[in-house]
Image: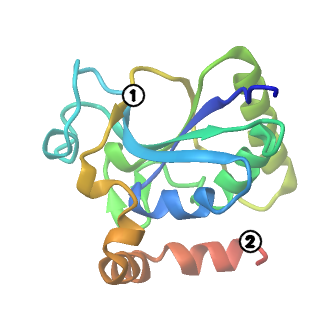
Amino acid sequence: MEKTHFEVATFAGGCFWCMVKPFVEWDGIESVISGYMGGTRETAHYEQVKTGITGHKEVVQITYDPTKFSYEQLLELYWQQVDPTDDEGQFQDRGDNYRAVIFYHNDTQKQLAEASKQALIDSGRFARVVTPIERATDFFAAEDYHQDFYKKSPQAYHEDRAKSGRDEFLDQHWEK
C-alpha cells in the first residue's frame, strides 16, 4: 500500500473562523487548523495577537494531498475567500493581524502563488491586488475554542459571517 504524501499550505484571509469551512469540504484536504503566523514574537496567543503588537496574522494551515487537490486549486479557492484589494484587514476585521497574506513553504509554492496573483491582476477583475506573498514562518495553532468554530458555534459563526460583509463582496466578485 502506497503512503500518502501530504503537503502544507498557509493562508491569512481575515478572521480565521471564516477561512476554515471553504477548505475543509474538499476531497484531498486532510485538515485545516486555525492559527497564527508572520509575527515577531516567539509565541502567539489570541489575546496578544488581537492587539496587533505581535505582528502575527490569523491564518489557516491546510494539510492536503496534492494528488487529489493541488496547490493551484487551493490558490484559486483562496482568492475567492478574500478581498485582495484591502491591505488594512478583511471585511469588518481591521488591522494588520487580519490582513490577507499567502505564506509559501517552498520555492514551488512561491512561484505558483506569484503566477496566481499575476493571473488575477491580468484578469481585470479587481482594480488592484495588494495581497502579499511571504515566506512561511513559525506556525502557532490557535486555542481549541477557535478550531472548527463553524461547527462548535454555528449560530455565532453565521451571525459573525453575516455582519462581516464577506459574503456580499464574494457574491459581487465571484460566480457561485
Horizontally, residue 131 falls left or right of residue 49, namely right
Task: Name the quadrant of the N terminus.
Answer: top right
Residue 58 appears anywhere in the view: no
Residue 158 position within the rendered picture, expressed as x and y whole percent measured from the top left = 40, 81
Residue 146 position within the rendered picture, expressed as x and y whole percent measured from the top left = 30, 55
Name the one closer to the observer, 172 or 146.
Answer: 146
Q: Disc count in the image?
A: 2
Q: Residues within 10 Å of mark 2 (few under 14, many from 20)?
A: few
What SS does tag 2 mark?
loop
| Residue matched to label 1 | 139
Name the one closer to the observer, 132 or 39.
Answer: 39
Looking at the rendered structure, the kind of residue marked 1 is Phe
Counting residues from the N terminus, which is met first, the one under dot 1 or under dot 2?
A: 1
Horizontally, residue 54 falls left or right of residue 98, namely left
Residue located at (37% from left, 50% from top): 98
Residue located at (61% from left, 56% from top): 23
Quarter of the image where one finds residue 145: bottom left
Looking at the rendered structure, the kind of residue marked 2 is Trp
| Residue matched to label 2 | 174
Between label 1 and label 2, give the one nearer the viewer.
1
Q: CA distance from mark 1 to mark 2?
A: 30 Å
Q: Is residue 80 above or below residue 36?
A: below
Residue 1 appears anywhere in the view: yes
